[in-house]
């Protein structure tokens, strides 16, 4: 079953820069896909269109049956409920503890307290952070903060998890731990993962599908790919 279909997508920013040209691709439910390429090649632009932070200027970008190019601003919440996003800088709320940071996303959609507790405890176990449930973000290491951000992103059981350079601020050992958390989520929950990264060690070790962007074009699509050395 297909989860993402990109058809003839072009993205031109208002300043005239074309970030992506005539992009076509398809991602199935349950896949784990890396998006790689040099700085400025269009990775963030592609990822941002998937959660409708940016809109394509041409073409169709269909995520779980919703064409993000045509989605009205008032309906964006419908798309956002189907997906979770993890960023390089975690974006946790500093005044909330671990439990509250993860529960917050469920409180705003009006879920019952009991159901929230069940779900939050389950995802914190899955990311290996149950003992830190009452800690605040400034009491956690970078790797632990990223685990909280991942727990928050999956607590609503999304079909798609989008990760934009999730290991960008972490050392190599911690980065591999985070990758093992993501791999676990992909395998155990069947969540589709699309991850933009610069980290060639990770890409080489994980042996997943790799999309290589170069100057706004998709130039390679490998299964069990490695980080291409052509792109530095
Ligand atoms: P990457 O994530 O691979 O570094 P980006 O998607 O951020 O690449 O950028 C692709 C191109 O689009 C670059 O030329 C960049 O300067 C340009 N770009 C990105 N965001 C904007 C924006 N908001 N406005 C104008 N140009 C942008």
Image: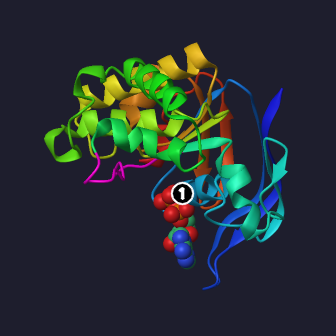
Q: What residue did someone put label 1 on?
A: 44
- What residue do we see at 47% from left, 54% from top? 38
Front position in the image: 112 or 35? 112
Q: Which quarter of the figure is the N terminus placed in?
A: top right
Quarter of the view holding residue 229: top left
Q: Image check: 147 left or right of 21?
A: left
Picture coordinates of residue 144, whole percent (x, y)? 26, 33
Front position in the image: 216 or 124? 124
Q: Is residue 152 above or below residue 59?
A: above
Disc 1 element: helix
Q: Residue furthest bottom?
A: 15
Q: Is residue 180 visible?
A: yes
- What residue do we see at 37% from left, 49% from top? 88
Main SS class of the magenta portion in the image: loop
Q: Residue furthest left?
A: 139
Q: Image check: 41 left or right of 49?
A: left
* Visual colour scheme: rainbow
Residue 89 shown in magenta? yes
- Give the residues in magenta: 85-96
- How many labels sit on residues? 1
Picture coordinates of residue 8, whole percent (x, y)? 84, 57
Picture coordinates of residue 107, whole percent (x, y)? 51, 45
Residue 185 shown in magenta? no
Front position in the image: 207 or 165? 165
Q: Indicate if the residue with disc 1 has its beta carbon within 8 Å of ligand 1.
A: yes
For label 1, the crowd category at 10 Å Cα-Cα, with few meaning under 14, some 14 to 19 and many 20 or more, is many
Q: Is residue 207 visible?
A: no
- What residue do we see at 37% from left, 44% from top? 101
């Amino acid at each position: 079953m297909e989860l993402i279909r990109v058809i003839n997508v072009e993205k031109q920013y208002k300043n005239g820069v074309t970030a992506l040209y005539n992009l076509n691709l398809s991602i199935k439910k349950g896949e784990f896909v890396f998006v790689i390429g040099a700085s400025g090649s269009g990775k963030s632009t592609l990822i941002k269109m998937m959660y409708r932070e940016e809109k394509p200027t041409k073409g169709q970008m269909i995520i779980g049956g919703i064409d993000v190019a045509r989605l009205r601003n008032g309906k964006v919440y419908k798309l956002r409920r189907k997906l979770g996003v993890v960023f390089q800088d975690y974006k946790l709320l500093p005044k909330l503890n671990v439990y509250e940071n993860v529960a917050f996303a469920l409180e705003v959609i009006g879920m019952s307290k009991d159901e929230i507790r069940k779900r939050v405890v389950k995802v914190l176990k899955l990311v290996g952070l149950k003992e830190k449930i009452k800690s605040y973000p400034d009491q956690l290491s970078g790797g632990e903060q990223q685990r909280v951000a991942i727990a928050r992103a999956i607590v609503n059981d999304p079909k798609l998890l989008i990760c934009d350079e999730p290991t960008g601020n972490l050392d190599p050992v911690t980065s591999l731990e985070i990758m093992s958390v993501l791999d676990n989520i992909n395998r155990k929950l069947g969540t589709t993962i699309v991850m933009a990264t610069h980290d060639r060690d990770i890409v080489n070790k994980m042996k997943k599908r790799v999309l290589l962007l170069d100057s706004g074009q998709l130039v390679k699509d490998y299964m069990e790919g490695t980080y291409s050395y052509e792109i530095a």
